[in-house]
Amino acid sequence: HTGWPYVAAAGGALILLAGLLALRFGRLWPAMSGRYERSGAPRPRAARPVDPDRPEDLWKALDRGEDPTGAGPA
């Protein structure tokens, strides 16, 4: 027999111990500040002219709900 099953069992025990320690002391760890939080308000966006030679601009205009052809309602 080799010692690898014992090594794997010891590694599993260490992972279990780390998980239990995280459950016990995790609430004491520092957290991110509110500095990086976004407010729920939508940001105003300036409408850029759509360049018909750039397909990604056409798709972005469609995502914004604009008509990239400029035809308007029929």
Image (tube, helix red, strand yellow):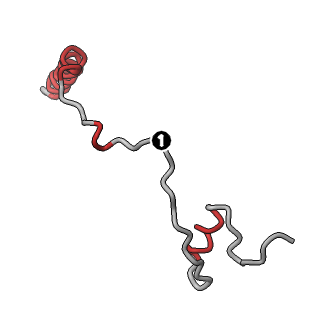
Q: Position of residue 29 (x, y in %)?
A: 18, 25
Give the residue drawn at x 65%, y 66%. 62
In the visual, does 55 lie left or right of 71? left
Give the image quarter of residue 24.
Answer: top left
In the current view of this chain or complex, which residue is farthest to the right? Answer: 74
Q: Position of residue 61 (x, y in %)?
A: 62, 68
Give the number of marks. 1
In the visual, does 67 lie left or right of 37? right
Give the image quarter of residue 4.
Answer: top left
Label 1 amino acid?
Gly
- Which residue is labeled 1 in the image? 40
Q: Is residue 1 above or below residue 34?
A: above
Give the residue drawn at x 78%, y 77%. 71
**Quadrant (top left/top right/bottom left/bottom right) for the N terminus:** top left
**Quadrant (top left/top right/bottom left/bottom right) for the C terminus:** bottom right
Give the residue drawn at x 25%, y 36%. 33
Task: Bin the neighbour count of mark 1 within 10 Å (Cα to Cα): few under 14, some 14-19, many 20 and up.
Answer: few
User: Depth check: 16 or 21 in front?
Assistant: 21
Give the residue drawn at x 12%, y 26%. 3
Q: Position of residue 9 (x, y in %)?
A: 19, 21
Q: Secondary structure at mark 1?
A: loop
Q: Is residue 49 above or below residue 42?
A: below
In the visual, does 25 lie left or right of 45? left
User: Depth check: 59 or 22 in front?
Assistant: 59
User: Depth check: 42 or 25 in front?
Assistant: 42
